[in-house]
Amino acid sequence: MKAVVYTQYGPPEVLHLTDLPKPIPKDNEVLIKVYATTAHVGDTRMRSFSVPREMWLFARLYLGVFKPRRKVLGMELAGEVEAVGKDVTRFKPGDPVFASTSSVNFGGYAEYKCMPEDGMLLIKPDNLTYEEAAAAPTGAFTALRCLRKANIQPGQKVLIYGASGSVGTYAVQLAKQHFGANVTGVCSSTHLELVKSLGANAVVDYTHEDFTERGETYDVIFDAVGKLSPAKGQQALKPTGIYLNVMADSGRGESIEELLAVKKLIVEGKLRPVIDRCYPLEQIVEAHRYVDQGHKKGHVVIRVTPNAARGRTT
């Protein structure tokens, strides 16, 4: 099977396309034909080993001290079940699925991936294409996990800093559509209309205006990109307000309950993935270069299999 691997840390050019043996599912696993994955910021950080200083030792031990231990990146995917192990009961060949692969050594940058049936794997929502579904898992449940910590009440004022990114685009939708908040999104001038279209009541162009100097205060401020200092973020908080930072408040680990909640919101029309660009697997280096620029809106999708946009039925 075709797969993109990396054997050393570094710039996008360390990624290269190669052939690997097609995996065989164990008794409790499903074999997924991967149609789409993403150039996730987590993938780019692992590739370049650009991690926060406080996580350096843990990351080295987990990812590999001298070279990568897990050679195939890809933190999320969507595709079709091709085969199942003899003990699998929840899935069958032909099922359209989407998944987070963070707890199973990644692997979305390949034509096939085996996953346990009780992993972070669900039937794909009918109202998403495979490309959209590949962009649905991690950003959405990260945003949901963080915002739940604030116990947001209808009508409260919520500011999302980094509102046009992968987590931010979901956070704007969740704060508005799910929690019923009055939402202000902070982003660059080129993304203002996008953030408005996601439901933001107001938008602030950070390239021309400092939101802390507007005289507005908020019940919740959520830094969805981890670039706002806590001291600055708290300047615009109400006395009882809550400051959240995606790097500190997203926690570790995954839960299928969170992915189920995300799927329910997608089916109900309260969440939709935002896709900036799509690249074929053969252009993975170009995709990582683009993500490294730090200006993407929503997600960058990788088409692992041609015609990956199949699968929307509504």
Image (cartoon, grey):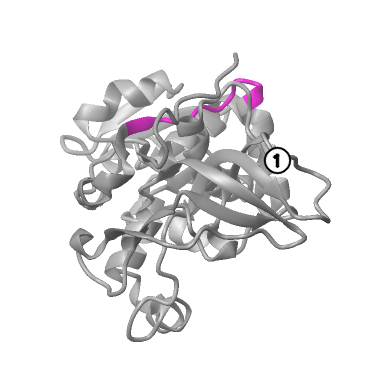
* Point 41% across, 53% down: residue: 234
Residue 86 can be seen in this image: yes
Quarter placement of the N terminus = bottom left
Residue 216 in the image: state x and y as whole percent.
37, 34
Residue under the point 61% across and 28% down: 266
The stretch in magenta equals 267-276
Seen at 71% across and 63% down, the residue is 26
Residue denoted by label 1: 260
Coordinates of residue 179 in the picture (x, y in percent): 62, 31
* Magenta stretch encompasses residue 7: no
Q: Is residue 79 left or right of residue 12?
A: right
Quarter of the image for residue 276 reads: top left
Residue, far top: 314
Q: Three-letter amino acid code at disc 1?
A: Leu
Quarter occupied by residue 125: top right
Q: Position of residue 311 (x, y in %)?
A: 55, 24
Instruction: Count every numbered label the image shows and give the total.
Output: 1
Q: Quadrant of the C terminus?
A: top right
Name the main secondary structure of what is drawn in magenta: loop
Image coords of residue 42 (percent x, y)? 40, 58
Is label 1 in a helix, a strand or a loop? Answer: helix
